[in-house]
Image (spheres, rainbow, N blue to C red):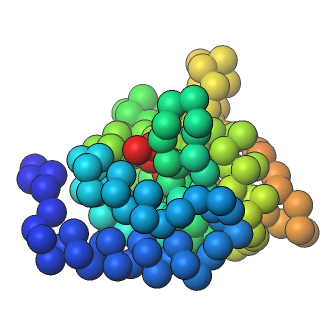
């Protein structure tokens, strides 16, 4: 798989990211676009951001980690990204499902994209920036003890409250996808 973007793809993606950055300043207070763009152009992670964009995740800068000197991007689409729904949680769940298997699983798709599933804390952080997943839900990185018992966690926002739930990891729904995080 070619993980390089053409110059026109790079230009289009950078314009899209800049426009989103400017449209939603509350998501990244105190962060300057020029510094983000400089990092984008040297990070080697534009392909992953393009995959996030292509699957309708609407990636945007949501923070800067001073300790690691990294900008943090999350999928900021209002609902779970359309291009990443109908997936069970991971490969073990996909293998365990005997009938009506989905095409793939969230963990492997995220890995192939070069991103990570949001953690429960990251999901709560995202929800502080707006109202996300009011009609959909999002698989979250599941702690090993929960996964060991066959479960996986997901989140959504209902009744103006963020909920974290559990489900069998092999389940999948048309309205459940996953959101990713990318550091650069």
Q: In this view of the protein, which residue sits in the foreground, 1 or 44?
A: 44
Residue 21 appears in view:
yes
In x, y percent, where is residue 84?
43, 61
In x, y percent, where is residue 157?
78, 63
Residue 132 appears in view:
no
| Quadrant of image for the C terminus | top left
Q: In this view of the protein, which residue sits in the foreground, 182 or 169?
A: 182
The structure residue drawn at horizontal position 50% and vertical position 77%, both measured from the top left corner, is 20
Tell whether 11 sits left or right of 137. left
The structure residue drawn at horizontal position 68% and vertical position 62%, both measured from the top left corner, is 29
Image: 144 above or below 177: above
The structure residue drawn at horizontal position 46% and vertical position 81%, both measured from the top left corner, is 19
Tell whether 127 sits left or right of 76. right
In the picture, residue 28 is in which quadrant? bottom right
Q: In this view of the protein, which residue sits in the foreground, 32 or 157?
A: 32
Image: 109 above or below 161: above
Tell whether 11 sits left or right of 73. left
In x, y percent, where is residue 128?
78, 59
In x, y percent, where is residue 122?
66, 44
Image: 37 above or below 14: above
Tell whether 159 sits left or right of 42. right
Q: How many numbered marks have been drawn onto this rendered protein structure?
A: 0
The structure residue drawn at horizontal position 70% and vertical position 69%, both measured from the top left corner, is 26
């Amino acid at each position: 798989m070619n993980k390089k973007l053409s110059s026109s793809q790079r230009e289009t993606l950078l314009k899209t990211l800049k426009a989103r950055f400017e449209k939603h300043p509350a998501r990244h207070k105190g962060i300057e676009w020029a510094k983000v763009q400089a990092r984008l152009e040297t990070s080697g992670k534009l392909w992953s951001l393009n995959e996030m964009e292509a699957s309708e995740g609407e990636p945007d800068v949501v923070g800067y980690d001073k300790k690691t000197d990294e900008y943090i991007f999350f999928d900021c689409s209002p609902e779970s990204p359309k291009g990443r729904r109908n997936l069970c949680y991971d490969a073990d769940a996909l293998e365990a499902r005997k009938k009506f298997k989905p095409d793939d699983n969230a963990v492997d798709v995220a890995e192939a994209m070069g991103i990570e599933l949001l953690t429960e804390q990251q999901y709560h952080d995202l929800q502080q920036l707006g109202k996300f997943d009011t009609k959909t839900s999002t698989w979250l990185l599941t702690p090993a003890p929960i996964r060991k018992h066959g479960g996986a966690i997901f989140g959504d926002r209902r009744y103006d409250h963020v909920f974290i739930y559990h489900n069998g990891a092999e389940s999948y729904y048309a309205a459940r996808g996953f959101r990713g995080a990318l550091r650069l």
